[in-house]
Image (cartoon, helix red, strand yellow):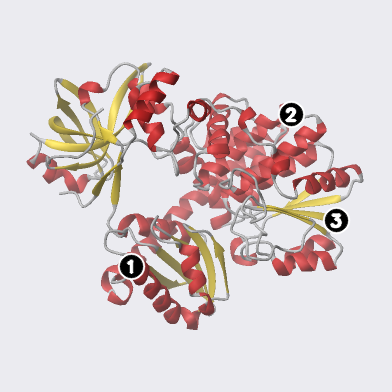
């Protein structure tokens, strides 16, 4: 029996019918749009067919005008400019697009990205001093810097101008800088607050394109920004949707510079229609592996490679990313197994609403992934801490009902430093403070989370009989791609259905079958569900299934298949049929 709570989504049926009639779209698609808060015909039209013209004026961001003037002045005066990035995909892609833009305008530009273990996170004083010693007159931070008070003061003391571009939550006081570009600034009236770090960097690129009369350059930067946007799991609405949707199309169509081309080749994606899955689970892990396991400069050098004479070097760099990704997977498996044992065997860890696990020498490059996997497995917020030389470095991941940044702020007296947002954060603490921090965070979680918050839920958009899956319905539903946070992949339910073929095991982890209802038969697959095989065999004559729609093309023929999210014994359902 399923442990998931099927969470049926309400819909304003009158609004959906009006939207369907106004735009000439199917009722199923109109309902999905309304359920995602898109009810006006104009907003829906922009959502279904986003355009770069839908991007807001970048000068609407506070301090953007000053930043553009300073960058152009640095270019004209041949001053040395440094892009200070971050070691994740968001930070790497931010660094790449801004460095390429300034270089294309004739600027003298370099970059610095801290190494996770050697340098720690974010814009730090030693990095500012190092860049000053290298003759840098202007530092532009991307995807970091909003809480770097000490580094900003040091830059000012050294006579370096600092432009901060970031999307993380600011403190009450902003750093001392020439410009602080962050849509989350309390005094910033910019209409889209949900940009990824690379989205904020792209706004600076957009402004520079406009000021220099190079608007035609913008699409080449958007496709790199799409990788960082999708990897950073920001809401895929508004400008993020424009960036992701158009960027994916550009990634699929090409042509590409030699570095991106080598990355796609090494990832097995050349010639394929690239979607959000390919970016999130194939491209992003490879780019991320550089910063997690070695140096992020591997990925930066690869994506900065534009000259075909660098083809051999680009192939070598892409191969190195593949190797680092395999090493990352090995480390991740080992740490995840240790963390699960601690949770399942130690009630001081596993019997609370928030999971806090720690291990000596755990690789800091993968603890964030482990935290995410613990959230998926236990549906509880998780903090994974690596302890080395008496210092703990932690990565935090959360669930929708729990504000992780607010929680660790409430426990901040036990920490050396921390930062992040509601769903993900990082922290540093003395190893001796681990027990007190764990107790404080667990108490905070136990106070703020109830049993219903900790029960995993499956969002169901509507009941959809298999006989209704015909015509353009699948194409219309998939027109809502890319799916992700803020625009979840639609999940429907149908039942009872009958299993007429299978279930058969695939790679000893997955189950494949064919299901029938009202004379319609569809192939279906349940990923990582081999343990459900006995249940499916027992109830093969009648099941309720929750599923998403996919299209599979093989030998030039495209077929609709069902990806099963859950299966359970038939029950009366309050879902609305469409």
Asked whether the viewer can see residue 272, the reply is: no
Q: Is residue 121 above or below residue 559?
A: below
**Mark 2 and mark 3 residues within 8 Å of each other at the beta carbon:** no
Q: Secondary structure at mark 3?
A: strand
Label 2 to label 3: alpha-carbon separation: 27 Å
Whole-percent x, y for residue 112 in the image: 72, 55
Q: Is residue 378 above or below residue 68?
A: below
Label 3 to label 1: alpha-carbon separation: 49 Å
Q: Is residue 480 left or right of residue 215?
A: left
Q: Secondary structure at mark 1?
A: loop
Q: Residue at x 15, y 26 (%)?
A: 516
**Mark 3 and mark 1 residues within 8 Å of each other at the beta carbon:** no
Asked whether the viewer can see residue 224, the reply is: yes
Q: Earlier in the sequence, mark 2 or mark 3?
A: 3
Q: Residue at x 69, y 37 (%)?
A: 57
Q: Is residue 128 left or right of residue 191?
A: right
Q: Which of 574 and 88 lies nearest the eye of the viewer?
A: 574
Which numbered dot is residue 353?
1
Whole-percent x, y for residue 487 in the image: 43, 39
Whole-percent x, y for residue 548 in the image: 31, 34
Q: Earlier in the sequence, mark 3 or mark 1?
A: 3
Q: Residue 352 sits in which quadrant?
A: bottom left
- Looking at this rendering, what residue extends furthest in the right direction? 77
Q: Which residue is mark 3?
A: 137
Q: Is residue 563 left or right of residue 191?
A: left
Q: Which residue is mark 2?
A: 215
């Amino acid at each position: 029996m399923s442990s998931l709570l099927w969470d049926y989504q309400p819909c304003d049926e009158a609004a959906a019918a009006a939207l369907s009639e106004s735009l000439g779209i199917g009722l199923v698609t109109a309902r999905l749009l309304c359920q995602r808060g898109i009810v006006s015909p104009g907003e829906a039209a922009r959502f279904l067919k986003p355009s770069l013209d839908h991007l807001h004026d970048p000068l609407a961001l506070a301090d953007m005008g000053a930043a553009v003037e300073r960058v152009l002045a640095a270019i004209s005066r041949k001053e040395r400019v440094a892009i200070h990035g971050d070691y994740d995909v968001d930070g790497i892609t931010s660094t790449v697009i801004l460095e390429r833009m300034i270089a294309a305008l004739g600027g003298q530009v370099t970059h610095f990205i801290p190494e996770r273990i050697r340098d720690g996170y974010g814009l730090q004083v030693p990095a500012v001093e190092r860049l000053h010693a290298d003759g840098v007159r202007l530092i532009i931070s991307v995807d970091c810097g909003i809480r770097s008070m000490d580094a900003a003061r040091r830059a000012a003391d050294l006579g370096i101008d600092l432009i901060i571009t970031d999307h993380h939550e600011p403190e009450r006081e902003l750093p001392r800088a020439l410009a602080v570009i962050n849509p989350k600034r309390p005094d910033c009236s910019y209409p889209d607050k949900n940009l990824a770090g690379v989205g904020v960097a792209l706004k600076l690129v957009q402004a520079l394109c406009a000021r220099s009369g190079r608007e035609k350059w913008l699409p080449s930067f958007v496709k790199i920004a799409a990788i960082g946007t999708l990897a950073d799991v920001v809401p895929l609405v508004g400008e993020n949707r424009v960036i992701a949707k158009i960027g994916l199309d550009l990634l699929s169509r090409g042509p590409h510079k030699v570095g991106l081309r080598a990355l796609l080749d090494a990832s097995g994606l050349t010639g394929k229609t690239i979607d959000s899955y390919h970016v999130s689970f194939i491209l992003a892990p490879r780019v991320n592996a550089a910063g997690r396991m070695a140096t992020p400069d591997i990925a930066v050098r690869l994506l900065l490679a534009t000259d075909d004479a660098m083809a051999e070097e680009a192939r070598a760099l892409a191969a190195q990313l593949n190797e680092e990704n395999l090493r990352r997977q090995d480390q991740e498996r080992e740490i995840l197994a240790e963390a699960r044992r601690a949770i399942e065997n130690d009630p001081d860890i596993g019997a609370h609403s928030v999971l806090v696990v720690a291990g000596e020498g755990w690789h800091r490059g993968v603890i964030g992934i482990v935290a995410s996997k613990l959230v998926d497995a236990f549906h509880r917020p998780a903090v994974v801490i690596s302890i080395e030389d008496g210092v703990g470095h932690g990565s935090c991941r959360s669930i929708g009902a729990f504000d992780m940044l607010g929680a660790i702020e409430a426990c901040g007296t036990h920490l050396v430093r921390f930062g992040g947002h509601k769903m993900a954060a990082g922290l540093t603490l003395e190893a001796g403070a681990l027990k007190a921090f764990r107790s404080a965070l667990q108490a905070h979680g136990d106070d703020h989370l109830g049993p219903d918050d900790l029960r995993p839920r499956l969002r169901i958009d509507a009941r959809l009989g298999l006989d209704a899956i015909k015509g353009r319905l699948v194409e219309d539903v998939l027109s809502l791609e890319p799916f992700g946070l803020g625009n979840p992949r639609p999940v429907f339910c149908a039942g009872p259905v009958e299993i007429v073929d299978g279930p058969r095991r695939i790679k000893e982890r997955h189950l494949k079958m064919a299901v029938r209802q009202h004379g319609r038969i569809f192939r279906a697959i349940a990923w990582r569900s081999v343990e459900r095989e006995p249940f499916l065999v027992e109830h093969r004559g009648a099941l309720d299934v929750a599923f998403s729609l996919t299209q599979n093309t093989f030998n030039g023929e495209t077929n609709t298949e069902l990806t099963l999210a859950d299966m359970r014994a038939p029950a009366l359902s309050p879902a609305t049929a469409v």
